Amino acid sequence: MSTAKTSSEVRERVVSAGMVDDDASFELKLRPRRLQEFIGQKKVKDNLAVAIQAAKSRGEALDHVLLYGPPGLGKTTLATIIANEMGVDYQQTSGPTLQIKGDLTAILTNVREKQILFFDEVHRLQPALEEILYSALEDYRLDIIVGQGPSARTHTLDVKPFTFVAATTRAGLLSAPLRSRFGIVLRLEFYSDEDLRIIVTRSAEILDVAIDAEGALEIASRARGTPRIANRLLRRCRDYAQVRGAGHIDRPTAQAALQMLEVDKHGFDEMDRKLLLAIIEKYQGGPVGLNTLAAALAEEADAIEDIYEPFLMQIGFLDRTPRGRVATQLAYDHFGIAVPRKQHPLF
Ligand code: ADP
């Protein structure tokens, strides 16, 4: 029997960037609605602001947009913001939800003029459906085959000009033809501690919980550069402050709450530690192949690549090399383990 964790188990980590338990209702409340309220990601905001203003002044639909980056950084939020700023309708679907051609054609034939069609996890769209999408995106046209064999006929349907906003955590998995349909391609980066501190402060205001700057920074610095995690940690700290503290969140309260949750100063949890320690202790620091590592951790390779690795690489604890994953000097230092200098490929 496989001991690999299911993805729902993976997402239950308190520092998971994916959605867990009751995130959805909170996120709705905390989600910024206008570009001005969206903190950080200056390059992305500047690009969008210009494109939106230009499209509005021409009275046209905005170009198709591809948003990519790790989970929890604001892709869905930006899609809704684009709709608000353009003053158009918004509709949402995702790669795994759409199974048959009929579903996609139904959506496309019903789109309203200039509306936003947000498509999450676009890398999981089935190839047969992707082909239908091409002509809809390029010429606002749908070719539908009716019937089978010699009596089959192709019907062409018009689609109203609309804006396709697609999100993915794996831009590398998109086919070249699909990628080329996007006029605006934007990459979301992990957030700085200062940006996250502002996000935490804003969320605390909406949730009506008192927090000081140091408390907010403590939460921000352990949130793995990810607003979704920062908001979740804030909620947990709020509970802690109410039950064990004086009701407001200062640095000691945040520290105590986060210690109870076993979130360390880098936002690492058990799985991050296990991953790095496996590379260091079982594979002498690496390089070790992704699949070997996944087997050693009884974890899915995809989860390692999408959920755990991006942040460990961002903070310089892990390298992806052509020969496999490598733990860096910083990772060794973190665990207080000496680097085996002769064998290690990086030194
Ligand atoms: P993704 O679609 O990339 O997984 P979301 O758009 O669902 O991420 O963002 C998760 C949550 O994080 C949102 O509900 C929102 O509250 C918060 N968030 C994301 N980006 C920002 C931001 N730049 N400023 C404020 N809050 C943000």
Image (spheres, rainbow, N blue to C red):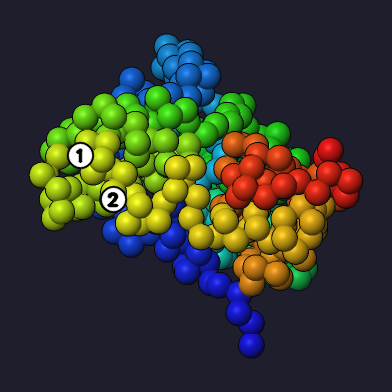
What element does badge 2 sit on? Answer: helix
Q: Taking 212 as reference, is 200 left or right? A: right
31 vs 167, nearest the viewer: 31
Picture quarter with the C terminus: top right
Above or below, 252 relative to 26? above
Q: Is residue 28 visible?
A: no
Q: Which residue is mark 2?
A: 257
Type of the residue with mark 2: Ala
Type of the residue with mark 1: Ile
- Point out residue 223 in the picture as x, y percentages from the top left corner: 42, 42
- Point out residue 78 in the picture as x, y percentages from the top left corner: 42, 33
Q: Is residue 298 visible?
A: yes
Q: Taking 102 as reference, is 131 left or right? A: right
| Residues marked 2 and 1 touching at CB (< 8 Å) | yes
What element does badge 1 sit on? Answer: loop
Q: Which residue is mark 1?
A: 249
